Amino acid sequence: MIEYRNVSVIYPNCIQALRNINLQIEKGEFVFVVGPTGSGKSTLLRLVNREERPTSGEVCVAGKDLSKMRGGAVPRLRRAIGVVFQDYRLLPQKTAAENIAFALFVTGAPRKEIMSRVIESLDLVGLADRADAYPHELSGGEQQRVSVARAIINNPQILIADEPTGTLDPDTSWEITRTLERINIRGTTVIVASHDQHIVDRMHTRVIAIENGVIKRDVKEGTYHELAKS
């Protein structure tokens, strides 16, 4: 599904974010990417939807080398990849349903189809009764679940989440993670960058640890604590 081949990323300020990364993520996996701030976690994720481009090496998604992808094909790639942000990025003047629907309106989807898929997405994240609420009327956890619903409205093959629980309390963080797990069970490949040791340990799924742009360990059923000692 996703393959990094000898990937390095060097920013214009000469900071090297990633160093010769070789990595494969299979279809349907749930993967945590962990490591200290500045280790390269976010850069690794942003390469998947071509928000970042490698300085050297190749990033392939579904067999396609993204560096050879023409500009016109990038929006199509991004529609197949859902993104969840730490800061939600909801439009304050739109309701939960409208925030989710906006991702489909821009593709020109029929209104009837849009409303059906919005209801389905809200139901999946457990917010069917909050469709008409505005962001300021929602808790942080509810806002993040709206963000997740928006990310999956296009039925993406891949969902990437960059610190999705970073500002949430432990119970709400677990609810968000279980929501991501339900989405993964439906067949979506899920990749989560996280500092949340408690969540990573409870999930006990594949964990990739990055430090100074280098993969230190890749464990099929790992925990954050084991990786921190490596």
Image (spheres, grey):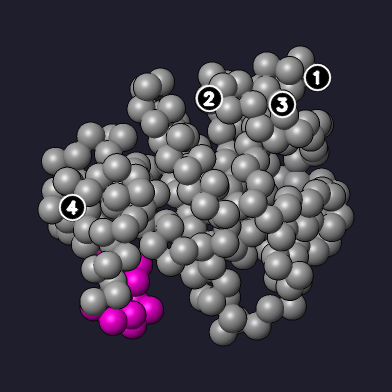
The C terminus - image quarter = top right
Residue 182's place in the image compared with 110, above or below, is above
| Label 2 packing within 10 angstroms: few (<14), some (14-19), many (20+) | many
Q: Please name the amino acid that badge 4 sits on.
A: Ala
Amino acid residing under circle 2: Ile
Residue sitting farthest toward the front: 186
Sequence-first disc among 4 and 3:
4
Q: Name the residue beneath numbered marker 4.
A: 131
Q: Is residue 55 visible?
A: no
Separation of residues labelled 1 and 4 (CA atoms): 45 Å
Q: Is residue 107 magenta?
A: yes
Amino acid tagged 1: Ser
Magenta region, mostly helix, strand or loop?
A: helix
Q: Quadrant of residue 97?
A: bottom left
Q: Secondary structure at mark 4?
A: loop
Q: Nearer the viewer, mark 1 or mark 4?
A: 4
Query: Which residue is pictured at 80% across the width and 64% down the height?
Result: 58
